[in-house]
Image (cartoon, grey):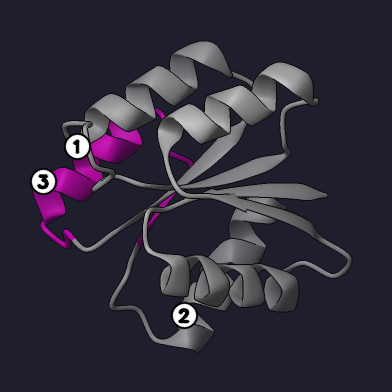
Amino acid sequence: MEVLIVDDDPLLREVLSAAVRKAVSGAEVVAVGDLEAAFERLAHFEPPDLALLDLGLPGHAGLDSLKRFRWKFPGVRVVVVSANEDEKAVRIALEAGAAAYIPKSSKPEVMVAALARAAR
């Protein structure tokens, strides 16, 4: 399974990569820092099975990133990873096509369990 991580924070990309590898045995993880880099990669490679997407990417207004990603790659399951824990934001992201929503403040074991579920 290939997993694409799109987050502007290098440390969080590393944490998410480790969580994915723990949640999904044999996962191939590709991490990029912004939406344009993700689209550039996807222009040259097959879409991933799963994408982890930060909604706080520079230059994009919240759900814009999710909507653009889902529009371009409707077959990819997208898990939103966000610092925003507001119930309304979670609901809106799920209604916009996110397969799951993981707050960045989640404990590692919660994140790993959520990723394992999203990968199935």
- Residue 110 image label: 2
Mark in the foreground, 1 or 3: 1
Disc 1/disc 3 C-alpha distance (Å): 13 Å
**Which structural element holds mark 2?**
helix
Q: Badge 3, how many Cα within 10 Å: few under 14, some, many 20+?
A: few
Q: Hey, what amino acid is under mark 2? A: Val
Query: Percent position (x, y) of residue 86?
Result: 10, 57
Cα–Cα gap, marks 2 and 1 = 23 Å
Give the residue displayed 52% in from the left and 34% down from the top. Answer: 37
Marking on residue 107: none
Q: Which amino acid does label 1 sit on?
A: Gly
Q: Earlier in the sequence, mark 1 or mark 3?
A: 1
Residue carrying label 3: 88
Over which residues does the magenta segment extend? 84-102
Which residue in the structure is indicated by mark 1?
62
Taking the magenta stretch, the answer to whether it contains residue 65 is no
Q: Badges 3 and 2: C-beta atoms under 8 Å apart?
A: no
Is there CB contact under 8 Å for labels 1 and 3?
A: no
Element carrying mark 3: helix
